[in-house]
Amino acid sequence: MVAVNNSEDGVKILRDIPVNIDVPMVMQSIKSNGANKRIETELRELIETVTPVVRPKVLYKAAQVTLADGNRLEIEGLEFTHHVPSLSFSEGERVFPYVATCGLEIEAIRSPGDLMKDYCLNILKNVILTRAAIKYFEDHLKQTYMLQELSRIGPGEAMGSTAQQKKLFSLLGDVEGAIGVRLSAHNMMVPEKSTSGIFFETAVRIESCQLCPNNCRARRAPHDPELFKTFRKKG
């Protein structure tokens, strides 16, 4: 059972998140047809090494929108900006700022000089972050807060500059003390396989990359400014 730790300021930590991954799942994430036997072998060995030690975690809170005005979004008195006026947030709406991570434990597994193993480990960490930590977190939010569907925006994507990371972290208190994630001088998260953003209820799910005009190697979907202009409407 996943441990949920609560603090006096409403911040919650999800620990002991189950990590159930296998080689086909990871191969699917890199859109491989399974023909590369070396990658499969490396992944199989790494999964056996990583699974017993990896400890993904999520830090989040249920917060309220205190101001919504076009591209401006204020949460508990802290102002953020985003690229998508059609999001149409409303004052008093409940949103869920969060930081999720693969954890520090997996960072000790390195293979200096072995480029193939490092490549496979990087893929594996991405899968753990997205298919274990984030997926579990979404399911937890839906069950806990009786939500039908969720979408998210995040710094560096639909929320624009990563400079907004500092405000997001400040909403959650001592992020490093809670789950081991800190910000670098350039507002990048350390450890690298961490992610942050704001989840909110929507009528249908939108991939945040679809809302973001920035060019990015990590893009998960093409930008589509016309997509789901009314996806925020309920009922």
Image (spheres, rainbow, N blue to C red):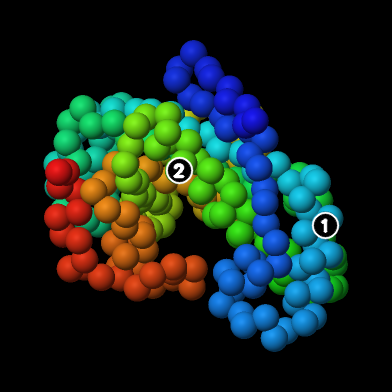
**Closer to the camera in the image, 146 or 184:** 146
Q: Is residue 201 above or below residue 35?
A: above
User: Residue 62 placed where, x, y %?
Assistant: 38, 28
Question: Looking at the rendering, in which quadrant would you find the C terminus?
Answer: top left
Looking at the image, residue 27 sits to the left or right of residue 163; the answer is: right
Q: Position of residue 126 (x, y in %)?
A: 61, 60
The residue located at (61%, 80%) in the rendering is 32
| Residue 222 visible in the picture | yes
Residue 11: x and y in percent read 48, 24
Image quadrant where one finds the N terminus: top right
Residue shown at 64%/72% (left/top)? 27
Residue placed under numbered mark 1 in the picture: 48
SS at circle 1? helix
Pointer 2 residue: 138
Identify residue type, mark 1.
Glu
The answer to whether 66 is drawn above or below residue 49 in the figure is: above
Residue at left 44%, top 69%?
A: 219
How busy is the neighbourhood of tag 2: few (under 14 within 10 Å), some, or many (20 plus)?
some
Give the alpha-carbon distance from disc 1 to disc 2, as whole Å: 26 Å
Which image quarter: residue 23? bottom right
Residue 158 appears anywhere in the view:
no
